[in-house]
Image (cartoon, coloured by chain):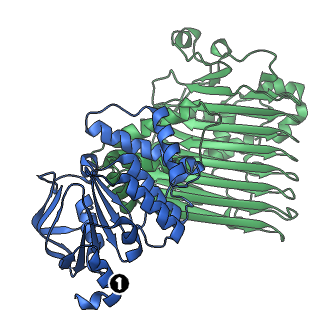
């Protein structure tokens, strides 16, 4: 079914009985508006024309068993598999009784009716005061779409559980139709006193992948979440990560984004001593864009946030980071920092960084900065004079640039290394690796 | 080992080296002294292959091969080492890891196998003790946060590990205290033998007091204006450059 057709039917019919927590009229109203474009501040560095110019088809059902069972999936332990945006238990390998429980969102809301109030259910309520205080609902188009089309999966970490094993979330794609939009929707709830690490790997795709993650880190709990995106050949990725952190709780977020993607991250430090460390690598090649909007809102006293970003643009591509720190009234003692460094590998490559501070309280510490540069020819000469070939020296320097922030959530992580190597392989194919 | 014939070099149409002739024999220690802006660092950069210089005339022969067509890494693989006046900092690459990459790259060029990691690390540790460098500097990012003296010692450390045929020291003694100078001089003593050569570019006598060069040349406006043995250093210390330029 086509997306437009589905939305028209919803307007007249009642297809949404199973999602009573959604404010259906508000969502349909948002979806009727235009997809955001470069006139919207948060979207000015990402071309949405390929999304606008397509008649998208939707997949409301899970892929057929014979489709996904034919494939040989990775034999990783402790893995949750999502195929075409749907959680597939049959190929997942998460051990039972290890302190993690998986529910469909409907089931979870049946058991915990009050939880629906935490979730995205109305674009108007969910949209926050954005830049210059303008209420800008447009970015929620994608969240609304996801919420409308996806049934959602809840991953709950039990109270006081310290889960030693890293949990993998793998996104695979069987659907070869590039006109399809898929909508993975994952909700993670770390209950009080829990500790867990997730590594999310999204493989290459040719379609439009519109994801939503909503994360709740309860009091005294700690979540490490690494989200790694493989090269996107012809597809488009729009994704939202919204995280709410309670007292003495902590989020370590690690992001590897590739070209043809737009990431919207919102972290809310809701309570006293809540904390987040965000490190992200944004890579872009050819003539594509990779754009991140990341906003950390300090609401609790003595809350801490630290953002470190590294952006690399090759050929005529563009990377962008819009990093906003907002310290609300009553968030005394907050400590926040944002720093981005951009590396341009070509005179025609571009990078955009916009650190922003909005401070509404006294007695807070906030730092921000951004730098842009090319590879230093003096450093290159130094390395060459020690016997290292120019191409290898450039790769080594890019690797060093990335190493400054680190991505791995453990010492033996091959995924992030392989994904970065793939980027190097891609840019090495270009004879003019650095111009 | 190294022979420079009628070399003229300019930058943006300004002549920096003017019809220079210089020969460095195997096993010899040669010093070049000269006032600021006389072209000493340009000479070291041109020998090592840095881009950005216009070679108007002449040849540089290393082991009887003209090296002008070789990239800096190929010159390094053939045995030319430049110790930098201002060693660069590279955050994100550990010192030992960088050095191993460099050594393996040179070995690959020369058709040799990669280094044995254990042996490499043992040699690194032995050498760092001799240079009075804390072994932690092996795991620290290359020159990042190093003091001026540590950076210069690290250059000597790289030199001793790479065992070049020709080592060019571009003001290795600038900014060093007496103890650091002694450590570096000891390192140079350890390196120097009848099979390799040293080209020492300096402003000061004190390093040369330790090294005792076989030849001393005074450089001005891109050429040698006076040559002699070690006694020339003493004369220079006494009378200054004005006597010769």
Chain drawn in green: A
Question: Dot 1 lies on which element?
Answer: helix
Relative image position of residue A325 (x, y in whole percent):
71, 60
Tag 1 subunit: B
- Residue closest to the eye, B245 or B146: B245
Left or right: A135, with B17 as reference point: right
Q: Quadrant of residue B41?
A: bottom left
- Residue closest to the eye, A249 or A69: A249
What residue appears at the point 51 percent right and 71 percent down from the top-left corner?
B178
User: Residue under circle 1?
Assistant: B237
Q: How many labels sit on residues?
A: 1
Chain drawn in blue: B
Relative image position of residue A233 (x, y in whole percent):
42, 35
Left or right: A146, with B106 as reference point: right
Left or right: A138, with A54 as reference point: right
Relative image position of residue A186 (x, y in whole percent):
70, 32
């Amino acid at each position: 079914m086509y997306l437009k057709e589905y939305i028209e039917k919803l307007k007249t019919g009642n297809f949404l009985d199973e999602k009573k927590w959604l404010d259906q009229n508000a969502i349909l109203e948002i979806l009727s508006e235009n997809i955001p474009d470069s006139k919207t501040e948060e979207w000015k560095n990402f071309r949405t024309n390929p999304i606008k110019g397509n008649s998208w088809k939707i997949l409301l059902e899970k892929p057929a068993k014979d489709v996904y069972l034919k494939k040989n999936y990775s034999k990783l332990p402790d893995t949750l598999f999502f195929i075409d945006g749907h959680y597939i238990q049959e190929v997942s390998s998460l051990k039972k009784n290890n302190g993690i429980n998986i529910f469909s969102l409907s089931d979870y809301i049946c058991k915990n009716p009050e939880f629906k109030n935490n979730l995205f259910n109305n674009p108007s309520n969910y949209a926050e005061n954005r830049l210059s205080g303008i209420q800008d609902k447009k970015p929620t188009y994608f969240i609304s779409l996801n919420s409308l089309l996806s049934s959602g999966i809840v991953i709950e970490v039990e109270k006081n559980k310290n889960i030693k094993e890293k949990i993998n979330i793998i996104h695979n794609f069987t659907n070869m139709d590039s006109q399809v939009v898929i909508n993975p929707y994952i909700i993670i709830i770390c209950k009080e006193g829990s500790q867990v690490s997730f590594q999310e790997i999204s493989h290459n795709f040719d379609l439009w992948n519109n994801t939503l993650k909503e994360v709740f880190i309860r009091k005294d709990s700690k979540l490490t979440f690494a989200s790694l995106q493989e090269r996107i050949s012809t597809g488009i990725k729009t994704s939202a990560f919204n995280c709410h952190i309670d007292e003495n709780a902590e989020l370590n977020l690690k992001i590897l984004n590739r070209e043809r993607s737009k990431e919207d991250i919102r972290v809310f430090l809701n309570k006293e001593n809540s904390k987040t460390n965000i490190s992200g690598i944004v890579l872009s090649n050819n003539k594509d864009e990779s754009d991140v909007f990341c906003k950390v809102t300090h609401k609790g006293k003595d809350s801490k946030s630290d953002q470190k970003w590294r952006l690399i643009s090759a050929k005529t591509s563009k990377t962008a980071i819009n990093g906003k720190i907002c310290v609300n009234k009553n968030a005394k003692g907050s400590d926040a920092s944002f720093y981005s460094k951009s590396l341009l590998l070509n005179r025609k490559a571009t990078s955009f960084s916009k650190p922003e501070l909005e401070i509404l309280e006294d007695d807070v510490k906030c730092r921000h900065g951004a730098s842009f540069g090319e590879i230093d020819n003096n450093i290159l000469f130094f390395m060459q004079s020690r016997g290292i070939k120019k191409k290898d020296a450039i790769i080594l320097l890019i690797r060093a640039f990335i190493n400054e922030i680190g991505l791995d959530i453990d010492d033996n992580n091959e995924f992030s290394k392989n994904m970065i190597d793939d980027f190097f392989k891609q840019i090495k194919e270009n004879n003019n690796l650095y111009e | 080992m190294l022979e420079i014939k009628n070399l003229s070099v300019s930058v943006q149409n300004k002549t920096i080296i003017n019809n220079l002739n210089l020969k460095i024999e195997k096993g010899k220690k040669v010093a070049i002294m000269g006032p600021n802006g006389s072209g000493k660092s340009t000479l070291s950069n041109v020998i090592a292959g840095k881009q950005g210089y216009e070679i108007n005339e002449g040849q540089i022969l290393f082991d009887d091969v003209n090296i002008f067509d070789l990239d800096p890494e190929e010159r390094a693989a053939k045995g030319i080492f430049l110790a930098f006046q201002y060693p660069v900092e590279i955050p994100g690459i550990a010192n030992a890891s960088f050095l191993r990459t460099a050594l393996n790259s040179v070995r690959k060029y020369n058709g040799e196998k990669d280094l044995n990691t254990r042996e490499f690390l043992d040699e690194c540790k032995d050498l760092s003790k001799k240079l009075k460098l804390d072994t932690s500097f092996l795991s620290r990012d290359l020159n990042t946060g190093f003091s001026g003296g540590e950076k210069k010692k690290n250059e000597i450390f790289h030199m001793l590990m790479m065992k070049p045929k020709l080592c060019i020291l571009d003001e290795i003694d600038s900014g060093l205290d007496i103890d650091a100078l002694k450590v570096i001089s000891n390192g140079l003593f350890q390196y120097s033998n009848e099979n390799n050569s040293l080209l020492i570019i300096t402003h000061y006598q004190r390093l040369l007091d330790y090294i005792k060069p076989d030849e001393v040349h005074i450089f001005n406006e891109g050429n040698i204006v006076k040559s002699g043995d070690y006694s020339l250093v003493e004369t220079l210390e006494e009378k200054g450059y004005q006597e010769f330029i």
